[in-house]
Image (cartoon, rainbow, N blue to C red):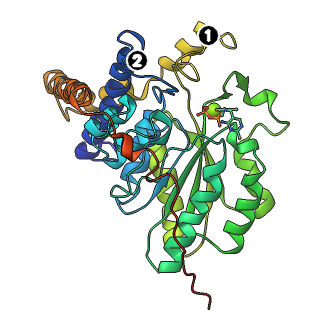
Amino acid sequence: MATKFSKETYLYWYELMQLIRQFELKAEEMYKMAGKIRGFFHAYVGQEAIAAGCMTATQQDDPFITAYRDHGLALAKGVAPNACMAELYGKATGCAKGKGGSMHFFSLEHRFFGGHGIVGAQIGTGAGLAFAEKYKGTNNVALCFFGDGAARQGILHETFNLAMLWKLPVIFICENNNYAMGTSVERTSNVIDIYKLADAYEMPADMVDGMTPENVHEAVARAVKRARQGDGPTLLELKTYRYKGHSISDPQKYRSKEEVDEYKDQDPITKVKTTILSNKYASEEELNAIDTRIGAVVDASVKFAEESPWPDESEVLKDVYIDQQYEFIVD
Ligand SMILES: Cc1ncc(C[n+]2csc(CCOP(=O)(O)OP(=O)(O)O)c2C)c(N)n1
Ligand SMILES: [Mg+2]
């Protein structure tokens, strides 16, 4: 059966999703078993198809911004695994110079604007990124990711209002993994279809299965097209699931093992692997070789992080506050 997407696309998706998963599983091991990583740590495991589909539907210059569950999207944007692992370790070679940790990955060079710990805050900032692109006259589209819990924050409404009024080139991507910490979507609102929140602002919206990169790509590509031609924002609700707890210290009393297993049965990496094998895009041996190569990249990132220096004491107040006057040009 012919596929809608090319062999190269499937292999890219497979490799990226494997990188994200192996990176996080290794990082979790270094956190729990080796005690090398401290502080908050929110895994993206299970949600990788969203990063994969968003990457093939956008261009490198399109800025991304997300919440604290940020390792996967940073890796997808091309932030080096070494710089990501070193950031988790708090080392000077990390992508935020070791000052941000898990929740604050950042890379201007890769157009990855964080990594934000205040739930929902990046919804406003994401629209700000889109405003900057429009103001500067680029054709870039900002992708602004947030969770189902963040969708209940008031900032969403003010942002949606202005984003529609000004037809900003932004795609609001709600990664609905059904839980905000231990609170299910059903317990947060009468409106459980989050994409419907766009209706009040006449914003186009869509809800798709976020466990397949194909669906994610198609929905994002439609929204990107609209934004690039000046038609403004879109809200996408992508239904997904996190296999791990909210953070590393979550006893997960709010859900059953059966529920988690049900989602693991639709694992995006396994599904893409099956498509690749059944279409003979690669053999089992070739995919195993990719897995081994990624394993080596991840192991090397651990070695890099361990051998990297701690930030110098003199750095402690740098990059925290910019004491600079900005000039705004008002027409
Ligand atoms: C303004 C604010 N309120 C509460 C918190 C505490 N908190 C951290 S994560 C979280 C849940 C957010 O869930 P969701 O938006 O669904 O994202 P997910 O963790 O599922 O990716 C909460 C309430 C916070 N960090 N910021
Ligand atoms: Mg959630």
How packed mark 1 is, by other alpha carbons closer than 10 Å (few <14, some 14-19, many 20 or more), is few
**Label 1 sits on what residue type?**
Pro
Horizontally, residue 304 falls left or right of residue 201, namely left
Please state, as top left, top right, bottom left or bottom right, where the C terminus lies in the image: bottom right
Q: Position of residue 26 (x, y in %)?
A: 33, 20
**Which residue is labeled 1 in the image?**
251
Image quadrant of ligand 1? top right
**Label 2 sits on what residue type?**
Tyr
Residue 127, image quadrant: bottom right
Residue 254, image quadrant: top right
Q: Residue furthest bottom?
A: 331
Element marked by disc 2: helix
Q: Nearer the viewer, residue 128 or 102?
A: 102
Horizontally, residue 136 falls left or right of residue 85, namely right
Residue 229 seen from this side: no
Q: Nearer the viewer, mark 1 or mark 2?
A: 2
Element marked by disc 1: loop
The residue shown at (37%, 63%) is 61
**Which residue is labeled 2 in the image?**
31
Residue 292, image quadrant: top left
Horizontally, residue 211 falls left or right of residue 55, namely right
How packed mark 2 is, by other alpha carbons closer than 10 Å (few <14, some 14-19, many 20 or more), is some
Tell whether circle 2 marks a residue whose Cβ is less than 8 angstroms from ligand 1.
no
